[in-house]
Image (cartoon, grey):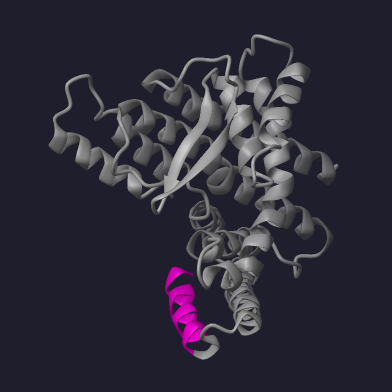
Amino acid sequence: MGAMIHFLKGLAERVAKKNIFKLYIAGAIITFTVVSSSGITGWIIERLFLFYEPKNPILIKLLFAFVLSSSLASRSLNKSIYEIINSISHKNTRDEMNKIKHKLSYIVGRDVENLNKHEILRASAETASENSVDGIFAPLFWMFIGTAFWKFNQFMPGPLTMAWIFKASSTIDSMLGYKEGKLKWLGFTGAKLDDFMTWIPSRFVLITLPFCCKPKQSILKTIRLAWKDGIIDSSPNSGISEAIFAYCAEVRMGGVNYYKGTKKLKPLIAKSYPIATVDSIKRILNLSLRLEFIWILFFTLIMELLRL
């Protein structure tokens, strides 16, 4: 997906140049091409698994589960975050801090060069909460939708098709969805599609995550407070995702960030709680794993009930 987007981006910029209308159209074509080709590829693979009669059906199911799991970033997200927080200590040398910042730059969009230890931990907490929705719960949600489609007709898009359609939109957004230069118009369609496909999953996380923790207030009040803090964010989804993890893990998020030298003030979330620490980041990652297990268990039960 990334290679295709990179190639089409270069081609679009050469053809459209600085024409805003052409950049909009080119962005729409890129989005349609990448999303449809990803979905069609997933659909073809599903056909092979569904209609090929294997000698060992259990092995085939395990293989399909392995292919499906490629859409989930649970392991890679945890690995990246733990590499950072396990490297941080009270006596890091300048060289060690530079290595930590370099690792952080792979998973955050903000400038990392001038971040101190506390800001590195805050960035890690925020990306752990936001990317858990983008990398785990949104693709899980669309897998569930694809599986539900199969209950009606197995020629409909299944879990792999829907997961890869989402991953395509998410990858377009991460590569082109910036409000700067030509990308402001070239990435518009992809960013809006990603917002649309993450809208419901992020709100499901808002409602279900408090059941995985013991909030200081009631579950309903926790959801209300997270909604109030998160909805202020310029993103319709990431603010809500960060807010519910902030209240459940009891950690403050938000503040001043720099993006390519430009200062941006993000609204404070859960400001009554302490700043991010290694322990609070671990709580975020553990909450994400618990919720992932609950979602899979709940959906499995629903699918079994539909069989009755």
Residue at 68% across / 47% down in the picture?
Answer: 141
Bounds of the magenta span? 1-14
Please give left or right for residue 21 compared with residue 155 in the image: left
As displayed, is residue 237 above or below residue 34?
above
State the residue in front, 60 or 53.
60
Task: Check residue 72 for magenta coloring.
Answer: no
Please give left or right for residue 189 compared with residue 123 in the image: right
Task: Check residue 11 for magenta coloring.
Answer: yes
Q: Quadrant of the C terminus?
A: top right
State the residue in front, 131 or 211.
131
Residue at 66% across / 82% down in the picture?
Answer: 21
User: Residue 39: x percent and y percent?
Assistant: 63, 70
Residue at 72% across / 37% down in the picture?
Answer: 204
Please give left or right for residue 84 compared with residue 238 in the image: left
User: Residue 88: x percent and y percent?
Assistant: 26, 27
Q: Quadrant of residue 7?
A: bottom left
Q: Quadrant of residue 168?
A: bottom right
Q: Quadrant of residue 237?
A: top right
Identity of the residue furthest to the bottom in this view: 15
User: Residue 113: x percent and y percent?
Assistant: 28, 44
User: Residue 271: x percent and y percent?
Assistant: 57, 20
As displayed, is residue 81 above or below residue 251?
below
As displayed, is residue 235 above or below residue 226?
below
As displayed, is residue 72 above or below residue 23?
above
State the residue in front, 201 or 7.
7
Residue at 58% across / 14% down in the picture?
Answer: 272
Q: Is residue 247 visible?
A: yes
- What secondary structure prevails in the magenta region? helix
Q: Is residue 55 visible?
A: no
